[in-house]
Image (spheres, rainbow, N blue to C red):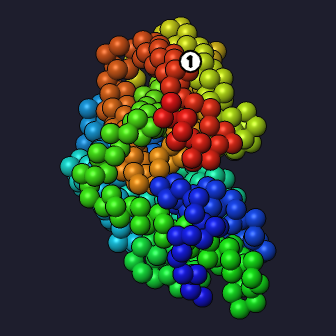
Amino acid sequence: MSPLPRDGNDPDHSDARDDDALLGSDNDIEEASKLVRGEPGIWVWLLVVSAGISGLLFGYDTAIISSALLQLANPPESSPIPALTVAQQSLVTSITSVSALISSLCSGPVSEYGRKKAIFAAAVVFILGAVWQSWAQSVQGLVIGRFIVGLGVGAGSAVVPMYITELSPAHLRSRLNTLNTVFITLGQIVAYLIGYWYSRTPFGWRPMFLLGGVPAAVQIGLLFFLPESPRWLVQHGYVENATSVLARVYGIDQEQSNVADRRMLSHLVRSIERGVRNETELASTSAKWKNLFGKRSNRRALLISGGLQGFQQLCGFNALMYFSSLIYAMLDFKNPTLTSLSVAATNFTFTLVSLVLIPRVGKRRLLLYSVPLMAVGLLVAAYGFNNLPTQQISTAQKENSATDAEPAGASSFYAYVILFSTTFYVASYASGIGNVPWQQAEFFPMSVRSLGTAIATACNWSSNFIIGETFLGLMDKMGAVATFVLFAIICAAGWVGIYVIYPDTEGMNLEEIEALLSR
């Protein structure tokens, strides 16, 4: 079925805001969605699961390095790779952030060849990186494998939210995008479980890395059953295909559809066409940069989204994700990998909690409540470290126990203080700042959305690199107490920034958000 012919005098569409369309402006979609007669079925959820595997890969790679470092820091005598120094551990950990930063910035042009193609390419790259890591025979080979994996992770983290947004029914869009964050936390849990399973296996880090390619292979298979983004199809002249995809998204049988259903589909396609025409006017890169930095509302959108993404990493959370096994080994827990599972499980649980809290409490209020609790958790952890006999990280492999995660040292009380305080910190993080920044697309109009979100995501990965590269050095030179106090100070500064610049946008459509940022 073809869309109705465009008519500038059409009363149904003359008031639509072109630059706020993704599948059209919010007003267009809300009006059209009222006409929906069908309900999206399992096909839409299959779409999210298939695309969300990229989030799972993101989480898996973030967490699996924590378990692998324990073995790489104290390998068997027959290992071709010598024990990694602190500097080498930092490099192996942080190099993925560098390549993810590069690929996230390049993902925009690549996605213009097709959202599915970009996700497919990211999955292939991730598989290549997983195989390369698992067969590495030198530190240099390991670094190269980690770099390749980062390319896949960065591309997936940038393209998948765009793909989900452009294919999701309007009334499910926010929830389905948030589920991508849930997949990230689920990937972290899977990584710690696999890390625990291979923790007592010689060269267990090899299967740890290799198994990361399995979800990517599954994703490649599922992508064959999924359509291209309707917006990309319209942009390249496949209007009939786009209409068919939208009908499947909204659960409409085109052969038996009524007038209202056909009107809704036409309305959605017209909204996409308007958005595509508006973007064409800003097709050149220089025009998009000029619009992004030349318009007050866009500058504020970039400041807010980029600031939140940077703060999400600089507050120190991924220091726990990357190095929790080393930290708990320092505390003399008999099985630091199993103990680290508490971090991932807490992150997953409270990410689900945030799904309930955000629509009820609001994003701004939730951040203002949760960030101070993060600082409290960090300060209590610093207190625990202050009372330990030593604050020096030991990378020696601890004796693992399949059932016992109790600390073996005499300072077990303070080890538990640190364990509970870091768990409290993670719960506070996952409830707010761990989730909210990834909803950044709402701040940008369509004309600069891809560029604005790419820059904001780059802020995340660059800050991620800083944490991965410097954390072990800070612990070694400053000590754990000063390091955790520093993160608490960053949380306090982040809270001030949120209070000053982050607006309450709950319940607003894109036009209202843009007007708010213009003031």
Q: Quadrant of residue 45?
A: bottom right
**Element assignment for label 1:** helix
Q: Residue at x 59, y 23 (%)?
A: 371
Front residue of 232/487: it is: 232
Q: Which residue is the site of mark 1? A: 375
**Residue 164 is at least partly visible in this image:** no
Q: Residue at x 50, y 81 (%)?
A: 239
Which residue occupies 34% across, 20% down? 474
Compared to 328, does 152 lie above or below?
below
Check the image and report above or below for 374 versus 385.
below
Front residue of 158/166: it is 166
Tell me if residue 225 comes above or below residue 8 in the rendering.
below
What amino acid type is highlighted by mark number 1? Ala
Question: Residue 486: x and y, percent?
Answer: 43, 15
Query: In the displayed image of the protein, which residue is found farthest to the front?
Result: 9
Q: How many marks?
A: 1
Q: Say which quadrant the N terminus sits in.
A: bottom right
Tell me what residue is drawn at x 72 percent, y 78 percent: 261
- Badge 1 crowding class, 10 Å Cα cut-off, few under 14, some 14 to 19, many 20 or more, is many
Q: Is residue 311 above or below residue 169?
A: above
**Residue 377: x %, y % from top left:** 60, 19
Could one spot residue 444 in this view of the protein? Answer: yes
Residue 27 locus on image (x, y percent): 64, 56
Q: Nearer the viewer, residue 245 or 53?
A: 245
Where is residue 358 shown, x and y percent of the image? 69, 39
> In the visual, does 253 lie left or right of 194?
right
